[in-house]
Image: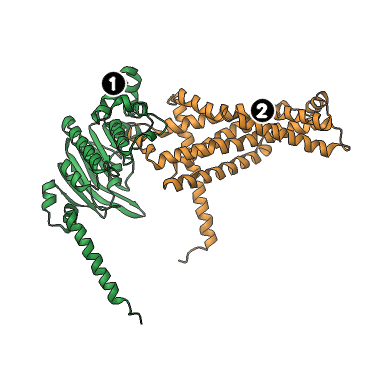
Amino acid sequence: MIEYRDVYKAFDVPVLAGVSFTVETGETLAVVGPSGTGKSVLLKTTIGLIVPDRGDVIIDGQSVFSSDPEQLQVIRRKAGYVFQNAALFDSMNVFENVAYGLPEKTLKTLGRREVTRRVSRALEEVNLDPAIVLSKLPAELSGGMRKRVGLARAIVGEPQILLYDEPVTGLDPVNAAAVDRLICDIAERTRVTSIVVTHDIEGGLSISDRVALLEGGKLRFLGTPDEFRQSRDPLVRAFADRKAAVQAAMEGSARAGRLADSNTPALS
Amino acid sequence: MSRPPGWIRAVGKVGATVAGHTGGMGLLAWRTATALVTGQVALRDFLAQLYSMGVQSLPLVLVTSILSGVVTSQQGGYQFTGSIPLYVLGSVVTSSVVLELGPVLTAVVVIGRVGARITAELGTMQVSEQIDALYSLGRDPVKVLAAPRILAGMPAMLLLVGISNLVGVLAGMLAARLTIGLGHATFLYGARLFWHSYDLFYSEMKAWAFGFIIPLISVHMGLLTRGGAEGVGRSTTGSVVFMIIAVLVADAMFPPLFLN
């Protein structure tokens, strides 16, 4: 279980303004919201990549921000983190990148053959052919393949928590759907606790057990995908119904245009 | 209460920046020492950095040291001819190269070839979230990235400065023969006349200090990088300026501390 307790973080202006909620073990939570509302910051605070100014994150009863460095490493090893741009190590090939996801001690004790077996299995789980990609460098991969390798690196150590930062951003609809499917498959098969930060509302609603909407650094909505779709909150409705959101935006700009026209002096 | 004048605020800002960098580098040095003492620095990473900093810098260091020896010898020969016994040239070239030119020019070469690369490499890793990825995988970037680079800098510079000194003096001796006809024996007589064995130790002490300063600053600046490709460019430029100033300031502190 992951518990966020009054997490507050400011970079000149508050990005997270005291966020509190809980993610149950085995649950998949989608975090959505307008750009710049602290979704990625919230995800990074989960394993202490960003230290909040106030508040704490509790993972399985253990405080992330009261832990010493060794305890923090143990907490981090419980989690796999899928970065927005995969964050693969440029100087390492796919095999080395994915193998790096195994704990240091495990890497030292396992033989090369066993490491190769685990890496290959992780790559197969994300629908990549190890025979083709193992020796490739990240620069030789497409965006979709890089995301999958990033996901393979996150799952190879069999984590109890998976944190996804914009897993489908920059992907075409087919690849985005494939990555969404992978997230679902992994969650169902391993019962891992997942938090998915995404701008893809439809994808987020289809893969999650619950949805959290952040706005202005605060939690505006937390509920099931059905509750999200049926909410009367205008912001939630704007997110749930893209067509309505586009229409509202167009009406807003037309009204602004009319106002501007009425304030513009006539040219003589 | 009125605000302090602009210059006081500017001095305060610079002071705070310097204190921040000094503290950051002190902490980095401490964590590197801790990683070394507790045996958490991979020998393979250390050797890779030693090869990259030392062996791969050798060609450029050789060119620089040959040219510095030749130029010192020629200019000394031009000034001494007809006024001072020419054997003194051996001492002038040897002292100039060993005490000053060898360590400082080698440091400048290493700053340009290695220091800038380290800052750009770590800066790119920082802005592309690779450093965060290391943390998320339970690895400490100081142990994995910083310590091997900082620890390899010192032996690499010792090696490079030693070779630079030797090659610079030999090049100066050869140039003296070719330009003013000063024989090797006369050159070496002059070199031995004012030679102190301590000079070589002094030169290697400088190498040791520069070999610590350069990777420490370059790693520190790389890990501080923010803001995409522009940020990497900015921090690399800042790092090179910072390293050159630090090396020259350290160089200026050596004579009063170790030659008196």
Give the percent coordinates (x, y) of residue B227. 42, 48
Q: Is residue A154 above or below residue A262?
A: above
Q: Residue at x 28, y 52 (%)?
A: A37
Find residue A213 and name its label. Answer: none
Q: CA distance from mark 1 to mark 2?
A: 53 Å
Between B176 and A101, the one nearer to me in the picture: B176
Chain ID at mark 2: B
Chain ID at mark 1: A
In the rendered view, does A188 fall on the left or right side of B40? left
Q: Which residue position is annotated with label 1? A: A117
- Mark 2, residues whose alpha carbon is within 10 Å: few (<14), some, or many (≥20)? few
- The chain coloured green carries which letter? A
Helix, strand or loop at label 2? It is: helix
Helix, strand or loop at label 1? It is: helix
Q: Residue at x 69, y 27 (%)?
A: B167
Give the percent coordinates (x, y) of residue A221. 17, 51
Chain B, colour shown: orange
- Mark 1, residues whose alpha carbon is within 10 Å: few (<14), some, or many (≥20)? few
Circle nearer the viewer, 1 or 2: 1
The answer to whether residue A157 is seen in the rendering is no
Give the percent coordinates (x, y) of residue B202. 67, 31
Q: Which residue position is annotated with label 2? A: B201
| Residue most extreme to the bottom | A268
Figure quadrant of residue B192: top right
Q: Amino acid at mark 1?
A: Arg
Same subunit, tags 1 and 2: no
The answer to whether residue A5 is seen in the rendering is yes
Q: Is residue B233 above or below residue B140?
A: below
In the rendered view, does B125 fall on the left or right side of A1? right
Between A143 and A36, the one nearer to me in the picture: A143
In the rendered view, does B258 fall on the left or right side of B131? right
